[in-house]
Image (spheres, grey):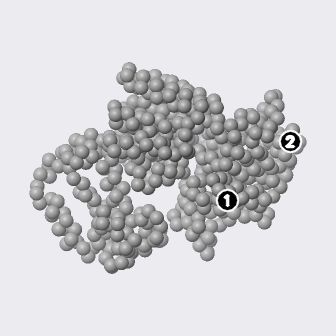
Amino acid sequence: MHIELKQWDSVESTNIEGNFVETYTGRPGNRVPHPSQQVKGYNDYLLGFVQVFEERELGLFGCAYCHNYQRKEGEGLYDPIYDNIRNEHPIYAGNEIEDLADKLKSFLQKGGGYDVFNRFMLSPVNPSKKLLENASNIVADSSDFTLLNDQIVARNTILSKIRNARKKNEKSVVIIKGGPGTGKTVIALHILAEIAAANHTRSVFFSTKSKPLLEGIKNKLGRRNDAKLLFSNLDQFIPSRVDEDAIDVLIIDEAHRIGKTPNHRFTKAIDRTDLSQTETLIRAAKTSVFFIDDQQVIRSAEIGSTDLIKSFANKYDCSVEEVELVSQFRCNGSDNYLDWLEMVLQEEHSNEVKLDDSYEVKVFDNPSRLYEAIIEVNNTPKMSSRLVAGFCWPWSKNLDENGNLIPDVKIGDFALPWETHGEITKPPAGYVKWYEWAYKDEGVKQIGCIYTAQGFEFDYIGVIIGDDLKYNPTTGKLETDINATEDPTLKRGKENFDEYVRNIYRVLMTRGIKGCYLYCTDENTKEYFKRMISN
């Protein structure tokens, strides 16, 4: 039996899908899961990973006790919209203490507590057979996860390397290198599914720093698919939680976003470690598979690189295999566009690249016209588009006095809000949380930044190039300006600012499958891009 304790004394029900309520948790009106929904999460985790529960050696019951809350039938936590989840995992209010006592007595009166405790504590902790079965099916019924050409070769190569490492009983690291659109995430999901389907492998996880990417994948899986438990952020594999080599295969997507350390401001003292984040990942798994693009490093706090991974692989005596993904399937498969973009942003004019018509690139004179084009695409059936920008405008942490998002990105008469700030836990009606911007339709009403767009793709992408990247007609070069950025992290990385800004716009301008629409706040920059397109 497990019990979730809550101190809440006042709760408002909501009709939002997923069993959410509004209550005070550090601030009034925060939107959080209903206690029964939280209990379900814990319950599903225990069933999914603790063997004695999976094999029904022990029963499992979860509930919540809200000792400061008074039950009022049909209101708050007891609103009828929560009946299904409460029937599955009941809650007990402060005025229901006798009911809770009776429930506890029914579970505890038979004795045998030491035996139950020992069986629980000694039980193996691995993904359950059911959970792995669900994971093995995640790519089967979706065209979004289809592999093509080189991607199939890469998947088979990676699986072969993983199997060989297992046969030799050696610790191994596989590094998959690929630029934008080469299908790194899709291949990673196929690897997860293939390994989960293999009876001999009991432990596999997919991990990435990107919360938007994680939530986007989980959204594709659906709310009731418990395979979501195999997806986590990078901070879960620290020594206090995971023994060395405890995981068979650990897949790390967007490995260029690996940080310096897994510690952060919310890390408990017992969980803090002196190991770097890269080392914790390699240490935790018998085989670590890193998907990386060394040219997508965009901030000093993110230090993931092929060389760094290799150095820690050597420390742990790992065999190291590298796979290079060459063919890309974004940008209409146009290597011409990627070569042109590299020339334009990095100013590699020694090899002039003339842009062909395989991929649509257009510069707009007005940001409103750009946005109208993006809306038109997004309103087309089976098409998607988003508007993004360089981080050259403030990002408001609060709503205005009327409870609306503040339109921070202002250019003349044009004004739109950024994606919802993480400090705003309850977005206004018709808007979504920051990590939902890329995969929920409402996201088209807001401007995304590099941190929400990275890892996603759309049919068309609109990019506003701010004053952090401007063309200087005197020098004839694109130049970066640290004074124009509103990104506090970039401001702290002065020595690499120029590289980071160019990488950021490279990432943003390669989010489109069929086309990229541009607007430049600086007139000279606008004319530079027009000239480079027409040359």
Q: Is residue 115 left or right of residue 125?
A: left
At 65% from the left and 56% from the top, the residue drawn is 381
At 59% across and 67% down in the image, what residue appears?
Answer: 430
Give the SS element for disc 1.
Answer: loop
Q: Could you say which disc has been placed on residue 438 in the image?
A: none
Furthest toward the right, the residue is 474
The residue that mark 2 highlights is 534
Q: Nearer the viewer, mark 2 or mark 1?
A: 1
Q: Examine the image and state in which quarter residue 324 appears.
A: top right
Q: CA distance from mark 2 to mark 1?
A: 29 Å
Residue in view at x 76 percent, y 50 percent: 518
Tell me the crowding category of disc 2: few under 14, some 14 to 19, or many 20 or more residues within 10 angstroms, Cα based.
few
Relative to 76, 365 lies left or right: right
Please state if 76 lies on the left or on the right of 334 as rendered.
left
Q: Label 1, on which residue?
A: 379
Mark 1, Cα crowd under 10 Å, few <14 / some 14-19 / many 20+, is: some
Q: Amino acid at mark 1?
A: Asn
Quadrant into which the C terminus falls: top right
Instruction: Please tell me whether residue 280 is drawn above or below residue 163 in the rendered image.
Output: below
Q: Amino acid at mark 2?
A: Ser
- The percent position of residue 268, horizontal first and vertical second, equals 39, 50
Element marked by disc 2: helix
Residue 419 in the image, given as x and y percentages of width and height: 61, 59
Q: Which residue lies at the image location 25% right of the left edge and 48% below the top edge? A: 53
Count of labels shown? 2
Residue 78: percent from the left, percent from the top?
A: 35, 73
